[in-house]
Image: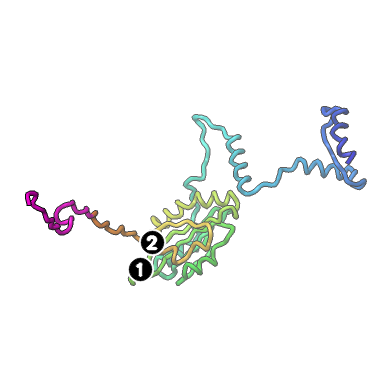
Amino acid sequence: MLYASSLATLKREFGLGHITREFRAASLDEMTLNAYNKHIQTQAAPPPRTMREEEILEIQSREATADISVDSRHPTLQGLFFPFDENVIEALHLFKKHSVNYIQLEIDHEKERILLSHSEAHVTPEKIQKCIPNNEGRYHVYRFIHEFNHIPCEKVLSIYSVPGYNSAIKQRMVYASCKESVIDHIEKKFGVMFDKKIEITEPTELTSEHLLELLHPVEHQVSSKSQFAKPKLPGAGSRGPRRLVKTTDENS
């Protein structure tokens, strides 16, 4: 305790301007050049950050190094389009023929192509949950066959699953940038029109009950208010029966 309490006084008397680094050791084994070099590397290493902090740091670094002027032109990821693989094209044709009712698409980031990840016939939303990865984005084309008010219904859904901060930042950016082009290409090129476009962050969000609420929202009917009944005006009918008052003759 005596050495620790007198350390600040010693550095001040020696001169704080002459001290460039401070290295502490708990034993003689730590007083080596290798231990000192590791200490220097540890001090120079960036502090641990969360995924959110890493994303903010990357945005700040891009803004700091950006060359912005009137004539500047920078490529963006908006409207990014990747070609479809042959298996995707075949699966979409089968989907249009009602041979399959579910298609899952993924992005090959190295080849920059849209690949077929999974396809299946007669699948339920609860079964699709097991096919959705927790660390990567996916595009889903799903024909939801159900009943509403005892009437058979079919709705074609475009589902975009993004796992949030469990996936890499660049992957999320690429999936988000390709989403509109993928939907537009499926509708215009293959004639598969979507009745509803859905975005989920967790596989557990995809349930039959949730889809029914999105496709057939309950309209809350406002009950008609009863008219305000005005109180009766004071009158003869409200004062009760008339009382008979017996008068006496003053002269009698």
Q: Are marks 2 and 1 in contact (CB under 8 Å)?
A: yes
Residue at screen point 83% across, 37% down: 22
Q: Residue furthest left?
A: 251
Q: Position of residue 16 (x, y in %)?
A: 83, 29
Q: Position of residue 175 (x, y in %)?
A: 52, 52
For badge 1, the amino acid type reads Phe
Task: Name which of mark 2 and mark 1 comes first in the sequence.
Answer: 1
Q: Image quadrant of residue 148?
A: bottom left
Q: Position of residue 156 (x, y in %)?
A: 40, 62
For the stretch drawn in magenta, what is the main secondary structure?
loop
Of residues 60 and 192, the one nearer the viewer is 60
Instruction: Left or right? Give the position of 1 relative to 234.
Output: right
Instruction: Left or right? Give the position of 2 relative to 80.
Output: right
Q: Position of residue 119 (x, y in %)?
A: 49, 67
Give neighbour class at mark 2: few <14, some 14-19, many 20+ (Cα, 10 Å): few
In 3D space, how far apart are the residues under numbered discs 2 and 1 (Cα atoms)?
Answer: 10 Å
243 drawn magenta: yes
Above or below, 149 relative to 114: below
Which residue range is magenta in the image? 229-252
Check disc 2 and report the residue beneath it.
215
